[in-house]
């Protein structure tokens, strides 16, 4: 799964086509994620200690991973993500970095 929490993504298909938002939560086992301000649903809630009034609550619902693309923080375009192995000079350890397929910048 190439998308992580706090990435900025753009919806590329479905009812929310073109909307952008920050990833709030990722569910890798279900290939779904929750995006801030996208796929808002209304839930009816009963009165409780936490919400004594009850009523209708609006919240974000998960959207499928295939319906979004990552927005590159460097070039600002929607892009696919590649991976590159980088060797750290100080500790000589290899790290796997994500790479923008458009501008070849690592993030």
Image (cartoon, rainbow, N blue to C red):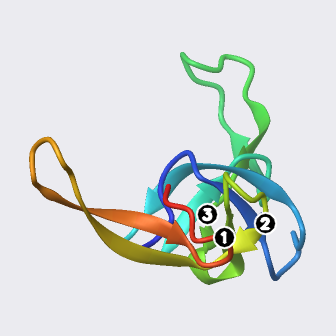
**What separation in Å lies between label 2 and label 1 (alpha carbons)?**
9 Å
How packed mark 2 is, by other alpha carbons closer than 10 Å (few <14, some 14-19, many 20 or more), is: some
Q: Is residue 14 left or right of residue 63?
A: right
Along the line of sight, the residue nearer the viewer: 27 or 47: 27
Residue tagged 1 = 103
**What separation in Å lies between label 2 and label 3 (alpha carbons)?**
23 Å
Q: Is residue 103 left or right of residue 99?
A: right
| Residue 26, position as x, y percentages in the image | 47, 58
Along the line of sight, the residue nearer the viewer: 67 or 83: 83
Residue tagged 2 = 77
| Residue 24, position as x, y percentages in the image | 57, 46
Mark linked to residue 62: 3
Considering only vertical position in the picture, is 59 above or below 97? above
Mark 2 or mark 1, whichever is nearer to me: 1
Mark 2 or mark 3, whichever is nearer to me: 2
Considering only vertical position in the picture, is 41 above or below 70? above
Q: Are marks 2 and 1 in contact (CB under 8 Å)?
A: yes
Q: Name the image quarter holding residue 72.
A: bottom right
Whichever of labels 2 and 3 marks the residue nearer the N terminus, that label is 3
Mark linked to residue 36: none
């Amino acid at each position: 799964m190439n998308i992580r929490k706090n990435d900025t993504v753009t919806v590329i298909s479905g009812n929310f086509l073109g909307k952008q938002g920050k990833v709030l939560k990722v569910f890798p086992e279900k290939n779904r994620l929750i995006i801030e301000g996208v796929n808002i649903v209304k839930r009816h809630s009963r009165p409780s200690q936490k919400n004594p009034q009850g009523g209708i609550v609006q919240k974000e619902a998960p959207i499928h991973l295939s319906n979004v693309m990552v927005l590159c923080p460097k070039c600002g375009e929607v892009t696919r993500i590649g991976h590159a192995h980088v060797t750290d000079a100080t500790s000589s350890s290899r790290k796997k970095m994500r790479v923008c397929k458009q501008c070849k910048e690592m993030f």
